[in-house]
Image: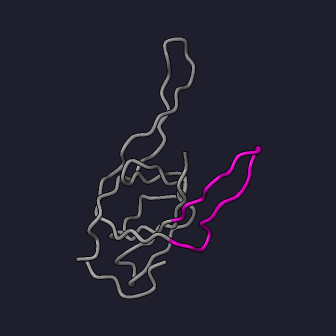
């Protein structure tokens, strides 16, 4: 996690933050999909803590953790996800940093 002072120039990677939305299909069934809440600049740091390999359902599962530091927003929660370089990251934790000028979002890569 970014514990050091964050500089606005370090936010040099583009990410999208998405929220899950529900709609109704032709037969009244609920259809869930993801839609963009915002696109913003981020400092992306991959964390070794929490990353690794394991076995689930007789398959090797690789876990990738990343910390995304962005300008502070009050409309992001753990039910959302981040899209970075074509990969989806589920949000685990959100922490305000730098006197609430920035926020660091801890996430893990999901398939």
The residue sitting at 43% across, 80% down in the picture is: 97
Please identify the residue farthest to the right as the structure is shown: 58
Quadrant of the frame with the C terminus = top right
User: In terms of secondary structure, what is the magenta stretch mainly?
Assistant: strand
Relative to 22, is 17 above or below?
A: below
Asked which colour scheme the image uses, the reply is one colour
Please identify the residue farthest to the top as the structure is shown: 27
The residue sitting at 40% across, 51% down in the picture is: 83
In the image: residue 92, left or right of residue 6: right
The residue sitting at 70% across, 58% down in the picture is: 54
Q: Which residues are magenta?
A: 47-65
Please identify the residue farthest to the left as the structure is shown: 9
In the image: residue 14, left or right of residue 83: left
The residue sitting at 28% across, 71% down in the picture is: 11
The x and y percentages for residue 94 are 51, 68
Does 60 appear in magenta? yes
The x and y percentages for residue 13 are 29, 63
Of residues 76 and 108, the one drawn nearer to the viewer in this rendering: 108
The x and y percentages for residue 82 are 43, 54
The x and y percentages for residue 96 are 45, 76
Please count the marks in the image. Answer: 0
Relative to 63, is 100 above or below?
A: below
Of residues 63 and 104, the one drawn nearer to the viewer in this rendering: 63
Does 31 appear in magenta? no
């Amino acid at each position: 996690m970014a514990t050091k002072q964050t500089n606005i120039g370090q936010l040099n990677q583009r990410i999208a933050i998405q929220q899950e939305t529900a709609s109704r299909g032709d037969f009244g069934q609920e259809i869930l999909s993801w839609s963009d809440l915002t696109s913003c600049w981020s400092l992306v740091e991959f964390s070794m803590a929490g990353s690794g390999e394991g076995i689930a359902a007789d398959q090797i599962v690789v876990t990738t953790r990343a910390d995304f530091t962005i300008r502070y927003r009050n409309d992001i929660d753990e039910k959302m996800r981040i899209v970075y370089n074509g990969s989806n990251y589920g949000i685990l934790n959100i922490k305000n940093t730098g006197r609430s000028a920035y926020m660091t979002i801890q996430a893990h890569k999901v398939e």
